[in-house]
Image (cartoon, rainbow, N blue to C red):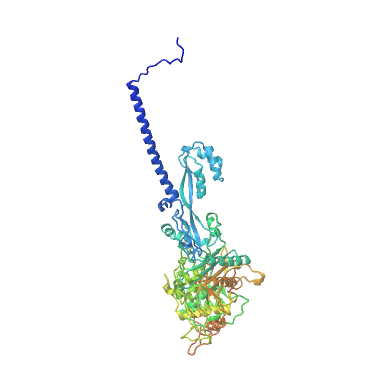
C-alpha cells in the first residue's frame, strides 16, 4: 500500500427535482417575507410619525363635543368678578341662582349614582372590600349581602363626587356602573335660606324660589338673578339676630325693599336654617315670618288709617280727634295708662303719639264701607303677590261682621292679621308718590341697579335754605324742593296709583315727625332722615284672648324721607324687657333702635352717604307742626264736630250689637272672652 494522505471516499449526491422545487419555494418565501417586513416597517413607521406629529410635534386640539360631557370649560382670568353671574357647569341642567351682584346663592354640582349588577360579580366579598376603600361609610356586611343577591340592579351609593367616581372606576371591578346626576348646593348656607327654598331628590323645587321658578330654572341655564344683595342680607341678619338675642324674642323678621321698584333687597326670618339641610331643619326654623306669619300690625296700621282719611278728604292735619277711652258694650278702647294725652289730638299728634281711641275716631269718620274698599285696594285682603309659594292669606273679618267695633279696632291695627311684607308694601305706597307696587325677588334692570353694582355712592340730596312752606289746603305738603326719584314707580309691572302725589308728600312729613318728635325717636340715624311708625300689638294666646305683656313689636320705616329710596321693617315676636328698656317691651324700645342700626350700616352699601352738609335745612323742609293752624274758612273736626263719634251713630239692633261685640274679640277666638277682662284690645301704643 502506497504511503501519503488518504482520500475520502467519493460520495455521489443526487439532487432530485423535488429538492430543487423545495429550494426554489423557500427562496421565494424568504423574498416575500423580506418585502412584507419592509412594508410593515414602513407602515408602522408612518403611523408612529403621524402619532408623534399629532401628540408631540403639532398636537391637535380636541373638539368641544368630544370633551364637553367630561371636562368643564377652562375658566378665564376674571379679577373683577364680572363673569360671576354667568357661572354654569356644562354637566348640569338646572340653572344657578345669584344675587343682584352675581354672587352665587344656589348651584347644581355634577355627581354620580353608583349601581351594580350582582349577576356580573365575580367575588362579592372582594368587591365590597375594594368599594369600602373609596366609600368608607357603606356597611360592609350589608354590601356583601346585596352584592350576593340574584338581582340584576342595585343602587350602591348616591351623589358621589367626580373624584370618588374616578377612584371606583380605577378599581376595575366588573359589574359596577355609574349614572350621571347633579346635586343642589347652597354655598352661603343660612343666607337667604327662606327665599331660596330647596329641591327634592329629583331636583324639583319644593319651597321658595326653587319651587316658584322651577320651570324657569330647568328650561333656561342662564343664571337666575335675584333682587337680593347678600351684603345687605348679611348686615340685616346680623343686627336682627343681635336684637332677638338681646330681647330674648322667640322670633323676628326684617325686610329691606326699594320703594320705587318693589325689589326686595333683603328678607330675613329668624330662627333660620342651613339651606343645604332643608329636610332636617326644624319646622319653626323653616317658617318664613316675613310672608307666611300673620301678625296684628298694631299701630303701624295707623299709617293706613291716616292715609285713607287724608286721601278721601275726610280729615286734614289740623283736624282733632278724641283720645278719651271709648266704651263699646263691655269693652273699652284706651291708650296706655302711662299716657297723659290731651282730650283732643290733631291728626299729626295722633300719628306722632300713637293714640288708639283717636285713630278709632278717624276710622269711624271714614266709615266701614270705604275702609274695606281702601284696605282691599291696598292689597290687605289677599296674599302679597311675590315669587314665594309660602305667601299666606291675611286674616280679616267677614264683611257681614264689619261693624262699628271692627272699624275702630282695625283703625289702630287690631282685629286683622297681616304678613310683614304687606305692611312694607303699604308703607312704600304712602311715600313713593302714591304708587302701590308689586314686590319682587327678581332683579330689575336699570340705572339704579347698575350704580349699586358698580359701587357708586351718592350723598343724600340737600335742599335749599329757607323757611318751611306754609301749610294750606292748596299745598298740603310741598317741600322746599321736590324729592328726586331714582325710578318711575308707576312704570313698574303691576303698579297702580292709590294715593295722590300731594298726599304722599304730606305723609312723608308726618312719618318724619314720628321720628323727630314722636314714638319713633330711637329710629333716628344721623344724616339719613328716617321716617316711620311704631307698632305694638299684644299676642293672642293659644286658647284665645290677648296675652298681657306679650307683644309683637314692629317698626316700619323709610329713608331718606326727603328722597325716599328704601323701606326698612323690623319685627320682634314676644320680646322681653331689659334694664335698658326700663321694663318696656314696646317697639320704641326694641324694634326702632334696631332699624336705626340697620340704616346706618346699609346706607353706604346701597350707595347713599349721610348728609352732613346741611341736615338742618333738610329737616326744616320736612318739618310739619304737631298742631297746624286751621286755614281760614275751614271748620275743623273736633269738639262739637265729630261725625264719627260712636255716640252719634244710630242705635243698632240687639242682634247686631252682639255681632259687633263678637267682632271685637281676637280673630282666632271670636267666641271666647278676652283674657284682659273688660278690655277687648290692648292698651298699648307704639
Q: Residue furthest bottom?
A: 632
Which one is in front, 274 or 322? 274
Which one is in front, 379 or 410? 379
| Number of marks drawn | 0
Q: Is residue 321 visible?
A: no
Q: Residue furthest top?
A: 1
Q: Is residue 25 left or right of residue 653?
A: left
Q: Is residue 555 above or below residue 136?
A: below
Q: Is residue 204 above or below residue 564?
A: above
Quarter that holds the C terminus:
bottom right
Q: Residue furthest right?
A: 579
Instruction: Give percent across and percent down for residue 354.
Output: 56, 77
Q: Is residue 146 left or right of residue 221?
A: right
Q: Is residue 7 above or below residue 519?
A: above
Instruction: Give percent across and percent down for residue 115.
Output: 48, 44
Q: Quadrant of residue 580?
A: bottom right
Q: Is residue 344 left or right of residue 46?
A: right
Instruction: Give percent across and percent down for residue 37.
Output: 39, 36
Which one is in front, 90 or 506? 90
Quarter that holds the N terminus:
top left
Q: Is residue 498 visible?
A: yes
Instruction: Give percent across and percent down for residue 652.
Output: 48, 75
Amino acid at each position: 500500500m502506497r504511503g501519503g494522505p488518504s482520500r475520502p471516499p467519493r460520495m455521489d449526491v443526487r439532487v432530485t427535482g423535488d429538492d430543487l422545487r423545495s429550494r426554489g419555494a423557500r427562496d421565494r418565501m424568504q423574498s416575500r417575507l423580506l418585502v412584507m417586513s419592509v412594508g410593515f416597517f414602513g407602515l408602522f413607521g408612518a403611523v408612529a410619525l403621524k402619532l408623534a406629529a399629532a401628540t408631540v410635534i403639532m398636537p391637535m386640539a380636541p373638539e368641544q363635543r368630544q370633551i364637553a360631557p367630561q371636562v368643564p370649560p377652562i375658566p378665564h382670568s376674571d379679577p373683577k368678578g364680572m363673569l360671576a353671574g354667568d357661572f354654569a357647569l356644562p354637566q348640569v341642567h338646572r340653572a344657578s341662582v345669584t344675587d343682584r351682584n352675581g354672587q352665587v346663592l344656589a348651584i347644581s354640582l355634577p355627581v354620580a349614582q353608583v349601581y351594580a349588577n350582582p349577576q356580573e360579580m365575580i367575588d362579592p366579598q372582594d368587591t365590597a372590600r375594594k368599594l369600602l376603600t373609596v366609600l368608607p361609610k357603606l356597611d360592609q356586611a350589608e354590601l356583601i349581602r346585596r352584592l350576593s343577591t340574584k338581582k340584576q340592579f342595585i343602587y350602591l351609593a348616591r351623589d358621589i363626587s367626580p373624584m370618588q367616581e374616578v377612584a371606583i372606576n380605577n378599581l376595575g371591578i366588573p359589574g359596577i356602573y355609574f349614572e350621571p346626576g347633579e346635586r343642589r348646593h347652597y354655598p352661603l348656607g343660612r343666607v337667604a335660606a327662606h327665599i331660596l327654598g330647596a329641591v327634592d331628590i329629583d331636583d324639583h323645587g319644593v319651597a321658595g324660589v326653587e319651587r316658584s321658578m322651577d320651570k324657569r330654572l330647568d328650561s333656561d341655564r342662564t343664571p337666575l338673578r335675584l333682587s337680593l344683595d347678600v351684603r345687605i342680607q348679611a348686615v340685616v341678619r346680623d343686627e336682627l339676630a343681635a336684637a332677638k338675642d338681646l330681647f330674648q324674642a322667640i322670633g323676628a323678621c326684617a325686610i329691606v325693599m326699594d320703594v320705587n321698584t318693589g325689589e326686595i333687597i333683603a328678607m330675613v326670618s329668624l330662627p333660620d336654617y342651613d339651606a343645604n339641610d332643608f329636610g332636617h331643619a326644624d319646622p319653626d326654623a323653616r317658617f318664613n315670618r316675613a310672608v307666611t306669619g300673620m301678625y296684628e300690625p298694631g299701630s303701624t296700621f295707623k299709617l293706613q288709617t291716616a292715609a285713607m282719611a287724608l286721601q278721601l278728604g275726610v280729615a286734614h292735619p289740623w283736624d282733632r280727634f278724641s283720645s278719651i277711652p271709648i266704651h263699646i258694650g263691655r269693652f273699652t278702647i284706651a291708650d296706655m295708662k302711662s299716657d297723659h294725652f290731651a282730650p283732643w289730638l290733631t291728626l299729626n299728634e295722633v300719628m306722632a303719639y300713637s293714640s288708639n281711641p283717636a285713630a278709632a275716631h278717624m276710622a269711624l269718620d271714614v266709615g266701614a264701607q270705604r275702609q274695606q274698599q281702601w284696605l282691599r285696594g291696598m292689597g290687605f285682603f289677599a296674599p302679597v303677590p311675590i315669587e314665594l309659594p309660602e305667601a299666606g292669606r291675611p286674616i280679616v273679618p267677614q264683611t257681614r261682621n264689619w261693624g262699628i267695633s271692627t272699624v275702630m279696632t282695625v283703625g289702630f291695627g287690631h282685629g286683622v292679621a297681616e304678613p310683614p311684607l304687606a305692611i312694607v308694601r303699604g308703607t312704600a305706597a304712602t311715600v313713593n308718590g302714591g304708587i302701590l307696587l308689586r314686590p319682587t325677588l327678581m332683579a330689575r334692570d336699570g340705572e339704579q341697579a347698575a350704580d349699586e353694582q358698580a359701587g357708586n355712592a351718592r350723598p343724600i340730596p340737600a335742599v335749599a335754605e329757607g323757611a318751611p312752606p306754609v301749610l294750606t289746603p292748596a299745598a298740603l305738603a310741598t317741600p322746599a324742593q321736590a324729592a328726586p326719584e331714582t325710578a318711575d314707580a308707576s312704570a313698574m309691572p303691576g303698579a297702580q296709583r292709590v294715593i295722590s302725589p300731594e298726599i304722599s308728600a304730606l305723609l312723608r312729613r308726618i312719618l318724619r315727625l314720628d321720628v323727630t318728635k314722636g314714638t319713633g325717636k330711637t329710629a333716628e340715624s344721623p344724616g339719613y332722615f328716617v321716617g316711620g311708625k311704631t307698632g305694638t300689638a299684644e299676642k293672642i294666646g293659644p286658647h284665645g284672648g290677648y296675652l298681657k305683656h306679650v307683644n309683637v313689636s314692629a317698626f316700619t320705616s323709610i329713608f331718606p324721607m326727603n328722597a325716599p329710596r328704601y323701606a326698612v321693617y323690623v319685627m320682634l315676636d314676644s320680646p322681653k324687657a331689659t334694664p335698658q328698656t326700663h321694663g318696656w317691651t314696646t317697639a320704641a324700645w326694641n324694634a326702632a333702635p334696631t332699624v336705626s342700626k340697620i340704616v346706618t350700616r346699609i346706607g353706604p352699601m346701597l350707595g347713599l352717604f349721610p348728609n352732613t352738609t346741611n341736615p338742618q335745612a333738610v329737616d326744616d323742609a320736612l318739618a310739619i307742626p304737631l298742631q297746624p293752624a286751621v286755614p281760614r274758612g275751614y271748620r275743623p273736626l273736633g269738639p262739637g264736630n265729630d261725625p264719627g263719634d260712636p255716640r252719634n251713630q244710630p242705635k243698632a239692633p240687639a242682634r247686631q250689637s252682639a255681632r259687633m261685640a263678637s267682632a271685637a274679640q281676637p280673630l282666632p277666638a271670636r267666641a271666647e272672652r278676652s283674657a284682659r277682662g273688660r278690655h277687648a284690645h290692648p292698651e298699648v301704643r307704639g
